[in-house]
């Protein structure tokens, strides 16, 4: 299997969805995030998708200074591609969501391709004894919440961060319409191939985690983008590994990490991000599928290189 077809593994290290009560293994502090990110890279992840959290209470934070508590350490200790969120935490303004990425000018950043209801409130029903006061309200708030990503919002991110900083994007597509939104920007010349298309399954408000949907999203992306894209898949919760392995067997790339699932097996919490990466890699090895290095990922995604960032 050539490096052109090797599976690019992304690892979403902490995210802004799960709260500290849900797992003692969720990295919170800059040191924890840096250590888990580097360990995930050593296990085989060539892209690290990163959010930041308040070191005191674990709540999502957009503060560039908190990001700078772990970004230089990650860069010094591994060669993985650093991919900074522009989704941030639910409830942040677009300016807050963009602040860290504009400050550090990463090789990659995430970019959601449409507005959507983003429902986390069912998670609040699973716990009663919370570590921090903010957690239940944060989850319950999403019962009446729209995650805003208008065409104007997206245009602004593409101009400020893409054109302005040379950052390329992980285009997060939570539904079929998001693929068509991305095609619209491609037709207008506002994005350039190769596109890194992350299709996301199993989030309440987005497309469901069913294999028929996986196939339909793949066929639609193929029709819209032809050979001008790299396809990646993530699925929330228990669907993480089955969907990832299915996508890899279809020629796709895979994202794992504690942002997307806190578990390593049924009823068993993952002790680290690297544990998920190692499990995925073991399965890929058994299927005779190669795993891409960070340099191979950079070449395929046409990234500017780790020496061109501002951290």
Image: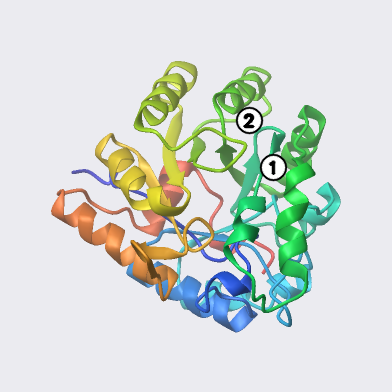
The relative height of residue 94 versus residue 186 in the rendered view (above or below) is: below
Q: Residue at x 48, y 75 (%)?
A: 36
Please state, as top left, top right, bottom left or bottom right, where the N terminus lies in the image. top left
Name the side, left or right, on which 279 lies relative to 103: left
Circles 2 and 1 in contact, beta carbons < 8 Å: yes
Q: Residue at point 23% right, 51% down?
A: 290
Instruction: Pick the quarter of the image with the C terminus.
Output: bottom right
Report which quarter residue 14 is drawn in.
Answer: bottom right
**What residue appears at the point 75 percent right and 66 percent down from the top-left corner?**
61
* Residue 76, horizontal then vertical, whole percent: 53, 77
**Which residue is identified by label 2?**
191
At mark 1, the secondary structure is helix
Residue 162 marker: 1
Q: Can residue 101 be seen in this view?
A: no
Q: Position of residue 304 (x, y in %)?
A: 56, 51
Relative to the observer, which residue lies in front, 141 or 256? 141
Using the image, determine if residue 287 lies above or below residue 67: above
Above or below residue 283? Residue 58 is: below
Mark sitting earlier along the chain (2/1): 1
Instruction: From the viewer's side, name the closer residue of 170 and 122.
Output: 122
- State the image coordinates of residue 5 (x, y, percent, origin top left): 28, 41
């Amino acid at each position: 299997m050539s490096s052109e077809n090797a599976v690019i593994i992304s690892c979403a290290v902490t995210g802004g969805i799960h709260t500290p009560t849900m797992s003692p293994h969720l990295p919170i502090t800059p040191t924890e995030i840096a250590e888990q990110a580097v360990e995930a890279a050593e296990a085989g992840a060539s892209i690290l998708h990163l959010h930041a959290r308040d070191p005191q209470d674990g709540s999502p934070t957009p503060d560039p200074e908190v990001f700078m508590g772990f970004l230089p350490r990650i860069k010094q200790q591994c060669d993985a591609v650093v991919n900074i969120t522009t989704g941030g935490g639910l409830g942040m303004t677009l300016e807050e969501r963009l602040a860290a990425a504009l400050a550090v000018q990463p090789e990659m950043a995430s970019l959601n391709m449409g507005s959507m209801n983003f429902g986390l409130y069912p998670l609040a029903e699973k716990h009663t004894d919370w570590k921090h006061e903010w957690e239940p309200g944060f989850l319950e708030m999403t019962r009446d919440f729209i995650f805003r990503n208008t065409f104007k919002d997206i245009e602004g991110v593409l101009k400020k961060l893409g054109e302005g900083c040379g950052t390329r994007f992980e285009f997060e597509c939570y539904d079929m319409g998001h693929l068509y939104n991305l095609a619209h920007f491609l037709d207008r010349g506002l994005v350039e191939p190769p596109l890194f298309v992350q299709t996301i399954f199993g989030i309440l408000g987005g497309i469901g985690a069913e294999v028929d949907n996986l196939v339909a999203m793949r066929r639609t992306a193929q029709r819209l983008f032809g050979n001008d894209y790299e396809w990646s898949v993530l699925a929330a919760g228990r669907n993480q590994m089955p969907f990832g392995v299915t996508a890899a067997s279809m020629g796709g790339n895979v994202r794992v990490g504690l942002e997307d699932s806190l578990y390593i097996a049924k009823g068993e919490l993952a002790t680290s991000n690297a544990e998920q990466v190692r499990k995925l890699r073991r399965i890929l090895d058994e299927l005779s599928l190669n795993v891409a290095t960070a340099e191979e990922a950079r070449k395929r995604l046409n990234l500017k290189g780790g020496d061109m960032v501002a951290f």
